[in-house]
Image (spheres, grey):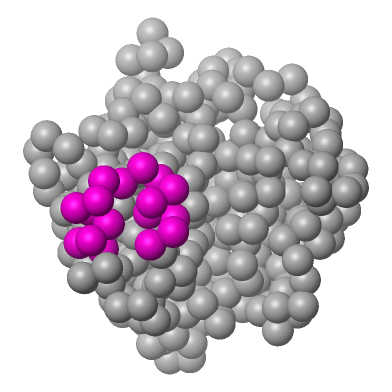
Amino acid sequence: MSDARLNAMREIIQEDVGQRGLRTDPADNLISATEGDFAAACRGIADTRDAAIAVVTGFFIPHAQPPAGETDGPLGALFLARALQPLGIKVVVATDGFCMSALQSGLAACGLRKSVPLISLPNTHVTGTLSGAEFWQQFAEKAGPLSHLVALERVGPSHSPETLQASGADAATQQRFRDEVPADQHDRCHTMRGRDITSMMSPAHLLFEAATRSEKGVWNPEERFQTPFSGRIATIGIGDGGNEIGMGKLPWDLIRRNIAGGGLVACRVPTDSLIVCGISNWGAYGLAAGVRLLRGAADSALFDVERERELLEIMVERGPLVDGMSGQMAVSVDGLEFERYAEALTRIAAV
């Protein structure tokens, strides 16, 4: 019965509501390539004793007035905290400075300021002086022991010829990449419109690369220090456009063929599980609901549409946060009016 319900949730969150091209190629697309990942992510958290997750979110919208973080991501992170923390699952949220006020206000409105730590990621001016190991160490000291690291609507760097070769791409694909993607756009963080925002984002992808190297609580020997983590940290990516951390699990050419501009923006950073969805917040709703279902704590009251609207209003006003499509401070997500956006909440609650 739980398998059927998880599949029903997955179908809801994977509606390509923005027509981004998640299923452009009927035979080989972002949805078909990750069919089992949603259930695996839910079970991975639900089945972990003393689970502890860090949710990394925040996406900068440079064309907004004013430039700010977008509503897709922080609202979903807040939902994960609201849904999982009462189950005894430790939740930590990490974001850039441009999303701190929004998340502080959201956590306060839910009475979670003291129980859900909020970590401010260092900006690029600081991280430019840190090695990847040092960046990880600073984060680890604040986050404490973790079992899972979740990237929620979090942009990651694109491919380079070296990463494409390392991924196993054939010679023809590597040549196509060199022909189509300018050299100055390699290993950069892009918006869906192809704008380079690398300098505006903390390099959170370093945390996910570090997590994959943690094994039995010990960093690779060349890093020369112990981590505070008790074992390998499972990683989960949640994204809706191909440019987010986690999408590196998929071949570059698959994203290129399905997503408009995908060859330029495709993120090179993989995660163990990848939840591809129509809107990233929907992926967070589904993950939270799936874990609660598997823990025997399904509760439709959590999916109160009016409460979600209220929290979004607070975060937009006090952040500010903006709609990622319009760039405006609005109670909407990815260009969807709230009523249409919230239909996913109602449908998941019914499941």
- Report the residue at 57% width, 74% height from top: 201
Counting from the top left corner in percent of width and height, residue 118 is at: 75, 59
Q: Is residue 82 left or right of residue 293?
A: right
Q: Is residue 321 visible?
A: no
Q: Residue at x 47, y 65 (%)?
A: 157
x and y percent of residue 332 in the render? 36, 67
Extreme-top residue of the structure: 1
What is the span of residues highlighted in magenta in the rendered image? 161-177
Is residue 29 shown to the viewer in this render? yes
Is residue 76 found left or right of 177 in the rendered image? Answer: right
The quarter of the picture where residue 13 lies is top left
Would you say the magenta stretch is mainly helix, strand or loop? helix
Quarter placement of the C terminus: top left
Location of the N terminus (image quadrant): top left
Q: Nearer the viewer, residue 159 or 117?
A: 159
Residue at 45% from the left image edge and 72% from the top image edge: 188
Determine the residue located farthest toward the front in the rendered image. Answer: 171
Q: Residue at x 41, y 30 (%)?
A: 37
Vertical arrangement, residue 230 with respect to residue 281, above or below = above
Per the image, is 165 magenta? Answer: yes
Query: Relative to 255, does residue 293 appear above or below in the rendering?
Result: above
